[in-house]
Amino acid sequence: MASEAELKALMAASLDGDAASYRTLLDRLSRRLRAYYKGKLARIGRSATEAEDLVQEVLLAVHLKRHTYDTRELFTPWVHTIARYKLIDYLRRTRSAASVPIDEGAEIMAQDDNADAESSHDVRKLLERLPEKMRCAIERVKLEGRSVAEAAVLCGISESGVKINIHRGLQSLAAFIAQVDQK
Amino acid sequence: MKTDDLVVMLSTNVEPIRHGRVGRTISIAVVVGAVIALAIMLVGLGVRADVTTSRAALFLSLKLAFAFAVVGVALRYLIMLARPGSESGISPLAVAVPFAAIALLGLLSLTDTPSGHWNRMVAGGEWLECLLSIPIIAIVPFAVTIFAVRRAAPTNLVRAGAFAGLVAGGVSAMAYAFHCTDDSLPFVAVWYGGTIVLCTLAGASLGPRLLRW
């Protein structure tokens, strides 16, 4: 199991733009978050799919808020605070009458769950709801793996426009996911 | 959607980003808010006419010292509240220090004065103007501060909202001080202190709605 030092090093490399480190980091985080949320939600009779919805919501949040992590500080408390915030927000949103004991400390580091899990969201369908430029930028760069320069030509916008549209598009996706959960 | 697919999507072509700049962004927002508050004061109210006299200068600097102390402490905490996981170690009681200090000074100056003058010292000439001006001038600095905090990741929204309100109230009091001609310590303690507390409470109640992400 990865330690604080390992995760922190991965995060620092990710912030510098190292995609391989970032993939490893998100993969490890998703396993931990899965175990954490499954445990929390099982206690109030919620399904594993709901846990996976939350895992994905937090991965998006980690991505969109990664600029708020300061490499001089510990990484685990940063992730843990976001995970707990999203859990409380989720329970409030889905009007849970039951209360989940809110944990302290590094519980999120405690377990690993490597199930090949799927959430209730269909990212392709959600992408269709985005404005054309955002969808184009995300599809070219994040799904097809093209460079920002290529995407700029294909989508007919500037390179900085591509970056801004990716960021705004992911923000909208996160917002859609939060709406979908509001059953 | 499979979580693995999301991980692949997010990590494809990830851009290097500038990080650890939360404090800087929020501080800049507060400075911008302060400049706007000063402009509103200049246009709407005007600087007190006797500002060059030494008595006016003394009280102006006292009011400014109080306002700056409030903003300084509150801003530090607000920045911590805007970053996940750096909340621990906060003692929100430190923000009470400037208020306690001005209240103490106010009480001391009351005990120094015959009780017949107390009413005038506390109510001053323009308590109503002060009561209205500080919260109204605080609106724009509050909005600018909230905008900056939203770009970060506050997780205790009531508290982050409260501290944004406190910062905005302090910034507004700083601007209003240039206009205000009520020069008594009890007046500053009650009306400056009171209106800044009002801004804090307003911020706390708006926080969950404005800062959610």
Image (cartoon, rainbow, N blue to C red):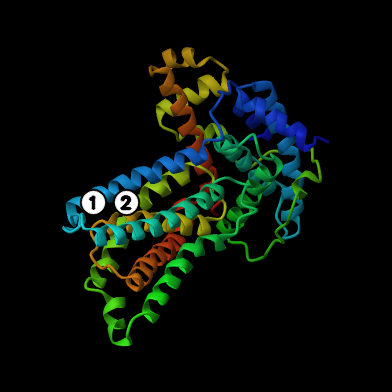
Question: Which residue in the rendered view is the most extreme toward the left?
Answer: B49
Bin the neighbour count of mark 1 within 10 Å (Cα to Cα): few under 14, some 14-19, many 20 and up.
Answer: some
Residue at (43% x, 18% y) in the render: A159
Which quadrant is home to the N terminus of chain A? top right
Q: Chain of mark 2?
A: B
* Callout 1 amino acid: Ile
Tell me residue A94's x, y (percent). Answer: 58, 57
Labels 1 and 2 touching (C-beta < 8 A): yes
Q: Is residue B205 above or below residue B168?
A: below
At mark 1, the secondary structure is helix
Which quadrant is home to the C terminus of chain A? bottom right
Closer to the camera in the image, B180 or B87: B180
Circle on res. B140: 2
Residue at (23% x, 53% y) in the render: B41
Tell me residue B192's x, y (percent). Answer: 35, 66
* Callout 2 amino acid: Val
To which quarter of the image does residue B135 belong? bottom left
* Mark 1 and mark 2 on one chain: yes
The disc, 1 or 2, on the residue closer to the chain's N-terminal end is 1
Closer to the camera in the image, B177 or B207: B177
